[in-house]
Structures are given as C-alpha cells and as structure tokens.
C-alpha cells in the first residue's frame, strides 16, 4: 500500500548549498521503498560527495555521461526509461536554463530529454537569480511543457538575504512525487470530497461545543485519494494538520458551514467520504458577548439539531461513504445509519478499542455495505483504512484497476 514501494525515481542533483537536503530526500525515498538513481552535476559534487548519495541509496551514483562504471555510459537512456518519475532537487538557475534549452550534455539533461515520466523541478538559488527575467522565462518554458515546478520557498537564503529561492522541504518534495505518481491511479479523473476534523459550535466569542476529532482520519483518506489519482477536496473543520500536496482545502468551522461546503463540492464529485465528527446539536442562539457567570449555580443551553450533511448529499451516481463513531453495539448501530443517510458504505468505528478512534495514527473499522456485507479490517494505519475505503469506492464506480505498469501519460 506504500505509494513509493517499488517505484523507480531518478534524482538529479545540481550544484547548490541545498544539496544536503537532497541527501535527506534520497534517504527518505529509499526508506519508503523506492529505487533511487542519483545523477549529479560537477557543481553538485563540489558540495556533497557522490559517496554520500551512494551510501543512502545503496546504488552507484551517475557522475558523468562517459563514466565507464555507470550504466548510463553504455545505455544513455536506461535511467530515463526505467524512471516512474524524475525529480531535480536542487535545480539551480543553470540547470533550469539547460533543461529549458533541451541540452543533453550531462546525465540530468539526457535523462530528462529521454524520459516519458513526469519531471518535478525543485528550484533553489538566490532570490535575485530566481527573480531574474531569464530564469523566470526558463521556469515558464518548463511549466508550459508540463514539468511540475515545486517551489521555491521563501525565507532566509545562503547569501543571508530573505526572499524566494529556498529548496522546499523533503516532505513537500515527497508530496509532489506522490501526486505525480498517482496520476495513473484507479481514481484518475475522479473527484473525491472528504470531510475531516470536528466541527465547533460557538456558544459565545470564547466558548464552543466541540469534540475530540483531530482530522487525522479524514486527512489520511485524502492522502490515499491523491495516491490513487483523484482530484481531492478536504472540507476541513479546524485542525493542526498539514494537508497533502495536491489537495484543495475548504476550511469550515461549524456543522452549517460544513454542510454548505460539502453540498457545493459534491455537486460534481464522484464520491463523498464523511470522516468528520459533526456536531449533532448547536446552540439555538450564539451570544455576541462573553456569557457571564452572574452568580448562577447552574446554566442551561438551548440546543437545536444540526442538519444531517451526508443525508442531504444527492446520490445521482455518486458514492456516499460515512463513518460511525460508536462505543457500544458498534456494528448494529452503524448498520442503522446506512438507510436514513443513503450510504453506499459505512466504516463502523469502535472509538473505545485500543489503537482506534480519535487522535491515534491507527484505526479499527469494519466496512458494511448497503447489502449488509461485512468486511472487518482490524487495526491498521489510518492511511491504510483510507486506501481500503477508496478501493471499494473505485470498484463501486467501476473504475479500471490502477495502471501502475502502463506507459505513463505524456507530460
Ligand atoms: O479525526 P480523528 O482524530 O482521526 O478521529 C477519527 C474519527 C473517530 C472522528 C472518525 O474515524 C469517525 O469515526 N468519524 C465519524 C464521526 C461521527 O460523527 O460519527 P456519527 O456516527 O456521529 O455520524 C455518522 C456519519 O454521519 C458520519 O460520517 C458523520 O460525518 C455524518 N454526519 C453526522 C452528523 C451530521 N450532522 N452530519 C453528518 O453528515
């Protein structure tokens, strides 16, 4: 289920102080199961020794087109053909200019010209160099050819200047890679809307009614949707999570705001997965000023029901998935929610079981479909739960299986 397991990544490293971050990227990709072929420019080798990359990738590093020890000197398109994706990180102004011209005088240029795989360019340079019209034009040229331009980030640069030119962080580079690799997934061309987190119903400007949801389950479903190639929208109640690269986030606070966003986004969606914990009740009135204790020993709030969001989503060929957060009679209580909410699938979630429910990285759910068929998933990571749910969604939508080994689409 690991999206990088067994994938072949060609990593082009050009000469910048940010080369040290490329070592971290190479190491992370290997840990995630990828086979990483590193190609270095001469300038890159001034900053980091090829041995460093060889040590983390357990593979020889390509230093030149004519290195007799390298397979590229025998078959100059070998890496290009095997790559599922090419990442250039850091990509200097010089390397970007050469790629824009289509030069093939080094292993990176030759590989990029010969590959049909997606190419992700992660610029890193001084802010003035990045802002220069020549670099801007080269970046635009690459973007117009379908290259993914990831970054640069703003911040402190090696020169001491503050500005745009920092290599993006490893997690973001991995995110761009996953987004590119997912393009051929089983949900390619489909739109998935995922709700995440716990809604907050304001009582006054200080207090609210909330719940324990952190958003981890919903964000994990979104990550899985991206790995399967879906256009992914997260309707997110307040949370502290970093959204996956490629997901669009619609931030909401209350159940009513979540309803509006979910209904708007679902009008052209293929699937809606409601992982959010939505308040069932809201204060009938919200006080504009902070409520005072006023010497009272007790206090009552007048509550009204919130709309059942997922029940309001029209089915019209769209797959509806709900979660049921239960603490007792988990399966029986989950089953009762399928018909009134018009669900195709419900994930019965025992929120009291160890390693399950709110805040944890794992979850224990049982999937129940409209026909009453039951699939117990046991304890697994929330990402794996998301993948299993979306595999069921893909099959309900009649999507073809993932085309992992098929010829990649032209950039
Ligand atoms: O975010 P985490 O910390 O990772 O925790 C994950 C989780 C425990 C919140 C998640 O796995 C989960 O179980 N989510 C559903 C929580 C919930 O609200 O369950 P429910 O049984 O009350 O609601 C059933 C379904 O109807 C849910 O899909 C819910 O999103 C939806 N609903 C509920 C109320 C409402 N007004 N509108 C809805 O659409």
Image (spheres, helix red, strand yellow):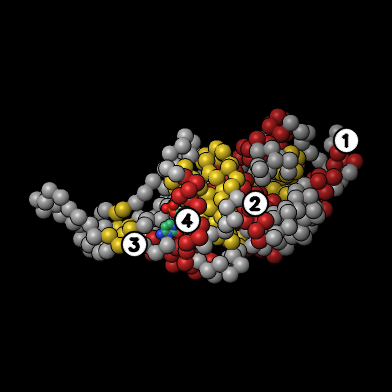
* Lower sequence index among marks 1 and 4: 1
Q: Quarter of the image for the C terminus: give it.
A: bottom right
Dot placed on the residue nearer the N-terminal end, 4 or 3: 3
Q: Earlier in the sequence, mark 2 or mark 3?
A: 3
Circle 3 residue: 305
Say what secondary structure mark 4 lies in.
Answer: helix
Residue at horizontal 70%, vertical 29%? 55
Q: Quadrant of the N terminus?
A: top right
View extreme (right): residue: 74
**Residue 128, quarter of the rendered image:** bottom right
Count of marks overlaid on the render: 4
Q: Upstream in the sequence, badge 1 or badge 2?
A: 1
Q: Is mark 3 within 8 Å of ligand 1?
A: yes
Q: Nearer the viewer, mark 4 or mark 2?
A: 4
On screen, residue 276 above or below 46: below
Q: What label sits on residue 391 in the rendered view? A: 2
**Residue at 74 percent of width and 31 percent of height:** 58
Q: CA distance from mark 1 to mark 4?
A: 66 Å
Disc 4 from disc 2: Cα separation: 22 Å
Q: Is residue 376 left or right of residue 189?
A: left
Between disc 4 and disc 3, the foreground one is 4
Q: How far from the left and from the top, in percent, is residue 56?
A: 68, 32
- Of 40 and 185, nearer the camera is 185
SS category of the residue bearing label 3: strand
The answer to whether 379 appears left or right of 395 in the picture is left
Ligand 1 contact, mark 4 (Cβ < 8 Å): yes
- Helix, strand or loop for disc 2: helix
Please give the label number shown on residue 337.
4
> Which numbered disc covers residue 68?
1
Q: CA distance from mark 1 to mark 3?
A: 73 Å
């Amino acid at each position: 289920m690991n999206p990088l397991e067994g994938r072949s990544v060609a990593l082009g490293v050009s000469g910048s102080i940010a080369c040290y971050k490329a070592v971290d990227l190479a190491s992370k990709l290997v840990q995630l199961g990828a086979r990483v072929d590193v190609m270095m420019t001469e300038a890159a080798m001034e900053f980091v020794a090829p041995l460093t990359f060889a040590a983390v990738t357990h593979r020889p590093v390509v230093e030149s087109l004519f290195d007799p020890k390298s397979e590229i000197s025998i078959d100059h398109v070998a890496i290009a053909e095997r790559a599922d994706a090419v990442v250039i990180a850091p990509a200097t102004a010089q390397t970007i200019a050469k790629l824009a011209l289509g030069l093939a005088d080094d292993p990176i240029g030759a590989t990029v010209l010969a590959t049909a795989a997606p190419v992700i360019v992660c610029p890193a340079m001084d802010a003035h160099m990045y802002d220069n019209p020549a670099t801007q034009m080269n970046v635009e040229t690459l973007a117009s050819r379908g290259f993914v331009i990831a970054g640069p980030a703003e911040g402190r640069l090696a020169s001491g200047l503050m500005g745009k030119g920092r290599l993006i962080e490893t997690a973001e580079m991995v995110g761009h890679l996953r987004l590119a690799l997912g393009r051929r997934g089983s949900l390619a061309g489909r739109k998935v809307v995922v709700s995440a987190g716990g809604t907050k119903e304001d009582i006054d400007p200080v207090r609210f009614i909330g719940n324990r949801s952190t958003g981890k389950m919903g964000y994990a479903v979104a990550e899985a949707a991206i790995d399967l190639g879906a256009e992914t929208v997260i309707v997110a109640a307040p949370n502290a999570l970093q959204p996956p690269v490629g997901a669009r986030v619609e931030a909401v606070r209350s159940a009513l705001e979540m309803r509006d966003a979910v209904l708007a986004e679902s009008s052209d969606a293929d699937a809606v997965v409601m992982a959010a914990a939505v308040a069932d009740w809201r204060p009938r009135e919200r006080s504009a000023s902070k409520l005072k204790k006023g010497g009272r020993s007790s206090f009552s709030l007048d509550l009204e029901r919130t709309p059942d969001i997922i029940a309001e989503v029209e089915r019209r060929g769209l797959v509806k998935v709900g979660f049921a957060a239960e603490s007792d009679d988990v399966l029986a209580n989950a089953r009762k929610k399928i018909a009134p909410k018009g669900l195709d699938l419900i994930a019965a979630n025992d929120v009291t079981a160890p390693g399950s429910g709110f805040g944890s990285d794992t979850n224990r759910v049982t999937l129940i479909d409209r026909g009453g068929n039951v699939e117990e998933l046991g304890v697994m990571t929330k990402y794996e739960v998301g993948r299993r749910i979306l595999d069921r969604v893909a099959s309900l939508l009649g999507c073809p299986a993932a085309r992992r080994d098929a010829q990649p689409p032209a950039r």
